[in-house]
Amino acid sequence: MADLSSTSYVILGMLSHQARSGYDIKQFVDKSTRHFWAASYGQIYPELKRLADAGLIEGEESPSGERRRTLHRLTAEGRTALHDWLVGGGEPVHEVRDELLLKLFFADGLPPEETLALLETKRALHRATLTQLELQLPAARAARAAQGLVPVPMALDYGIRFHRWAVEWCAETAAELRGEAGAVARPLAGAGTPEATR
């Protein structure tokens, strides 16, 4: 079949442990992968049909209150497609969309107090996300242990470490802009520094 979209693989992954409706998939995305790979209803439902037409998932009508919903589950072919993608080669897509970082990129002409306001907004955003992720950690560890999986939820752990670093970076950068006593200028990433190779 034709190459699957990234949204298709999000769906296959979401169905790898249990059957879910399109609504269930969107709710789970919003609590998990949206921090690094979002998917909207407008993407999910067309992909569910495409995956079903390709024989990678199958649906089953399930009553839910006054409404009927379709629970989707992986077929053997769908599980194979997910596995092949997980271990497959090719150039992975890596992109970061961060509007506040984009604003900081162009902030050279701003007065210091306006740049500081941007940094504070960014720090607060990372702090809020960090708190949200940390609250998820105990339940995520328990769920993985119950399923006999690796105890560390790797993507969640990555997110916690990243946002913790981002909070610190915002605070340190703001201190440098203010010229606070004791603020130590950090070397910029460049040739010969570890940051340049990351």
Image: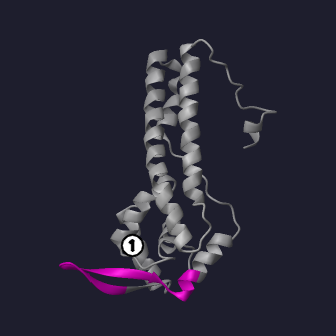
Q: Position of residue 121 (x, y in %)?
A: 43, 31
Determine the secondary structure under disc 1. Answer: helix
Q: Quadrant of the N terminus?
A: bottom right
Tag 1: Cα neighbours inside 10 Å, few (<14), some, or many (≥20)?
A: few
Q: Residue at x 60, y 59 (%)?
A: 154
Whether residue 102 appears in this view of the structure is yes
Q: Residue at x 49, y 57 (%)?
A: 138
Q: Is residue 53 above or below residue 14?
A: below
Q: Residue at x 68, y 24 (%)?
A: 186
Q: Position of residue 89 (x, y in %)?
A: 71, 68
Q: Is residue 71 above or below residue 23?
A: below
Q: Position of residue 91 (x, y in %)?
A: 68, 61
Relative horizontal placement of residue 90, taking residue 139 as reference (left or right): right
The residue carrying mark 1 is 46
Judge whether residue 67 is colored magenta.
yes
For the record, the magenta segment spans 60-79
Q: Residue furthest right?
A: 192
Q: Is residue 80 above or below residue 131?
A: below
Q: Quadrant of the C terminus?
A: top right
Pick the residue in front: 107 or 1: 107
